[in-house]
Amino acid sequence: MHRYILKRLLLVIPTLFGAAVLVFTLLRLIPGDICEMRMAGTGGYFDESAIQTCREEMGTNQPMLGQFLSFIWGLMRFDFGTSMWTGQPIVSEIALRFELSLQVAIMATIVAIVVAIPLGTISAVKQNTWIDYVVRCISIAGIAMPAFWLGILIILGLLITTQHWFGTPWMPPISYRPIWEDPLYNLSMLIWPAVATGYRYSAVATRMTRSALLEVLREDYVRTARAKGLWEKLIIRRHALKNAMLPVITVIGIEFAFLMGGLVVTEQVFNLNGLGKLFVESVSNNDYTMTQALVMLVVMVFIFVNFVVDICYAWLDPRIRYG
Amino acid sequence: MAEDIFMKAEAMTATALSADIEAELAAARAPFFKAFGKWVRNQPLGAGSGAGVIVMILIAVFAPQFSPFDPVVSNYERLAEAPSAEYWLGTDQFGRDLLSRIIWGARTALFIGFTSAILGATAGLVLGVGSAYYGGWVDLLFQRVMDVFLAFPLIIMALAVVAIFGTGAENVIIAITIPFVPRCARVVRSNALSIREMPYVDAARALGYGHLRIILRHMVPNCMAAYLIMLTTFLGQAILLEASLSYLGLGVQEPTPAWGLMLQGGAEEYAESAIWIAIFPGLAITLAVFAFNLFGDAVRDTVDPKLRAR
């Protein structure tokens, strides 16, 4: 197992390094000078000395290799520099929002797991019955429906039902309070985006649970278990579901990393001040350093999650470790 | 006498056999519509969604003929009007007909969807086959590079590209195409690895054909199954991605009609006054992606049931 972890870890390093190179080059691919772009974007007044100061601040007047090395050195210390838009250190800007996004991501994952595993199991056990068809339709729709539209529908539904029942429209609160300070307030705010992003997530996981379980249910050992008269529920829970969980865990892990993408859009809908919103703002403000830092952050999370999934997979299925 | 009967029997089985073979050959050469009919019966969902896709394409192509109003001209006397006999789906906050905008939006969505899916899948096909064909350190290097690209979630990569090139339809196509390339290349590569070992590739090499000819004429056509599967998978994803980018204001820009853009106004504004503005464009996106996904599933099952693409 240790060997396997080490092997996987060694594969992570070149990927991370490559991603850093790519992200670094992205910033240099921008047509024209970043500083000129920035000046043109803000006022249109060109001042040679201002551009010079800007270049010095950005470090773009230094040789490329030196810039790259300081970028990597910064990454290692989680120092992404300062935002070109607000002038604040990027780390503190990110730290402000990280908690909220992480909470939504975790809640969406919980929603997905709680919904997907039972639904997928029922759908597989009762294959080709009306329950199966309903579940499959729900999950296909979940994959087709854009998360942001679902978010809009949830807000509309909330506004209209509260208007109808209580006379005044109610919206989820917008300013964030941590869950340990005011759990009710926090949940009433974040449960909706979690559901909006979790729906797609659970749809993918439900489909995976169903197909994996269907495959396992045809295995010989399930037939043996049935032949010896084991209680069907026990067969499913202990023999089938456990073995069907491997691909489901992979999908849940990969989707967790994709969630970061889903959050970008959902946070916009619910007006949440999270990482996704920061990302969109930094792209539309031409805040290149911030964009660069956020892309790098997401990639690091993505690679890390994939790594953890691989380890889980090997831990659950010894064949992979030795393979 | 007995021998005679034997002879006869043998002759009979022979003719029966040849008739069987004839029938089989005929079935193999069945006319297109017959084979098509069989496919429809085997894949009713796929056929239905395929019809939906064709209808969508027709709507997109003939948008000027189908749409009752100009999608970009505002009528300031009819702002945010409810669906009626004149405006079937109502009007938006600028007094533009929603139905017309959805029809023209289909054109935007399908144009961007098809262009980026075809570009991305084709680039992935050539790169994947090339990487598998050359093998060795080229393949190794290529795989690591693809790993790096795959470490970027789809929309993050797209946003990063938009950050560099800016917004607008052409840049959206670039932004959607780039993340597709490695995803297709990886699937095609694993497929092409086995094709490289086929005798006909050896034969082509023995005949002294150049690398490019072997790749393009002998290997690429045999990777068509994987290519088609990835292509149809990308179509739905591209439409979804385009809608998301446009919704964020980082895709297609006003006044171009695009489904994501139509939802941009913010839901709370329309809760009481004009709920249809927030409903119909989203419904259009969902139905389009739904049809493309179902169609893609059917194509996957038909072309290669074993190959599972995410």
Image (cartoon, helix red, strand yellow):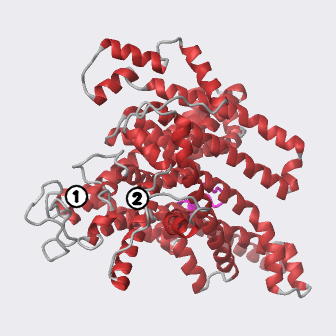
How many other residues sit within 10 Å of disc 2, few (<14), some (14-19) or many (≥20)? many
Helix, strand or loop under label 1:
helix
Location of residue A134 in the rendering, given as x and y in whole percent from the top left corner:
54, 80
Q: Nearer the viewer, residue B232 or A300?
A: A300
**Residue drawn at 88 percent across, 55 percent down:** A318
Pick the quarter of the image with the C terminus of chain B: bottom right
Residue B268 in the magenta stretch? The answer is no
Checking the image for residue A269, the label placed there is 2
Q: In the drawing, does residue A19 fall left or right of residue A138?
A: right
Helix, strand or loop under label 2:
helix
Location of residue B173 in the rendering, given as x and y in whole percent from the top left corner:
39, 42
Reply above or below: A27 against A133: above
On the image, numbered disc 1 is attached to which residue? B63
User: What stretch of residues is rendered in magenta?
Assistant: B299-310
Three-letter code, disc 1 = Ala
Instruction: Say which of marks 1 and 2 sits in front.
Output: 2
Q: Nearer the viewer, residue B293 or B128?
A: B293
Residue A313 seen by the camera: yes
**Residue drawn at 39 percent across, 67 percent down:** B287
The tally of labels here is: 2
Residue B221 seen by the camera: no
